[in-house]
């Protein structure tokens, strides 16, 4: 069973590089939908970062990871911002409040795409991550748009 939210389906399509599907789903959002939908993305990012990095990870390892992302995905990857978001997700007190929604969204999606690449774009694993993120969003009291 696939994701049940619009955001979940968008994220899965993005992670698996199903461009036509992700573009179609993105068109259904107004700046990626409601704040509740954004919480599915945030939870997905949280899960992926937790799987990529162990607690107490060396900051250099995060920098290398983001450098590799930029090499693979190009200059659209917001380098310093992605690094700051990852460090924030790992519990470090980093300044992220001044980052735009667009920048945070790009950083999270590129990180999720990198996670999917590490998983060899395994649809079952990616679906599981997104479904877990949807569940977290609902458990936290958010009501993202259903697909």
Image: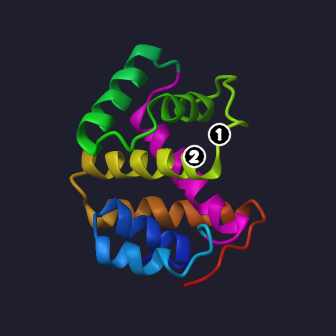
Q: Which residue is mark 1?
A: 99
Residue 75: % across, % down: 34, 39
Residue 101, above or below 127: above
Considering the image in quadrants, where does the C terminus appear?
bottom right
Position of 37 with respect to 108 (left or right) is right
Tag 1 near tag 2, CB within 8 Å: yes
Position of 118 with respect to 91 (left or right) is left
Q: Residues within 10 Å of mark 1 (few under 14, many from 20)?
A: few
Element at label 1? loop
Residue in front for this viewpoint, 122 or 76: 76
Report which quarter residue 12 is drawn in.
Answer: bottom left
Residue 123: % across, % down: 29, 66
Report how far apart the C-alphas of labels 1 and 2 lie in the structure. Answer: 7 Å
Q: Which residues are magenta?
A: 33-55
Residue in front for this viewpoint, 10 or 135: 10
Q: Which residue is mark 2?
A: 104
């Amino acid at each position: 069973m696939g994701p049940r939210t619009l955001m979940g389906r968008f994220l899965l399509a993005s992670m698996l590089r199903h461009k036509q599907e992700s573009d179609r789903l993105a068109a259904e959002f107004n700046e990626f939908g409601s704040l509740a939908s954004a919480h599915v993305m945030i939870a997905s990012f949280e899960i992926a970062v937790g799987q990529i990095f162990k607690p107490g990870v060396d900051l250099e390892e995060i920098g290398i990871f983001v450098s590799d992302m930029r090499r693979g995905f190009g200059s659209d990857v917001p380098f310093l911002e992605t690094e700051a978001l990852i460090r924030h997700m790992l519990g470090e007190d980093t300044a992220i409040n001044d980052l735009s929604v667009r920048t945070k969204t790009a950083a999270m999606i590129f990180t999720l795409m990198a996670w999917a690449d590490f998983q060899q774009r395994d649809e079952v694993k990616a679906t599981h991550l997104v479904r877990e993120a949807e569940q977290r969003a609902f458990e936290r009291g958010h009501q993202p748009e259903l697909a």
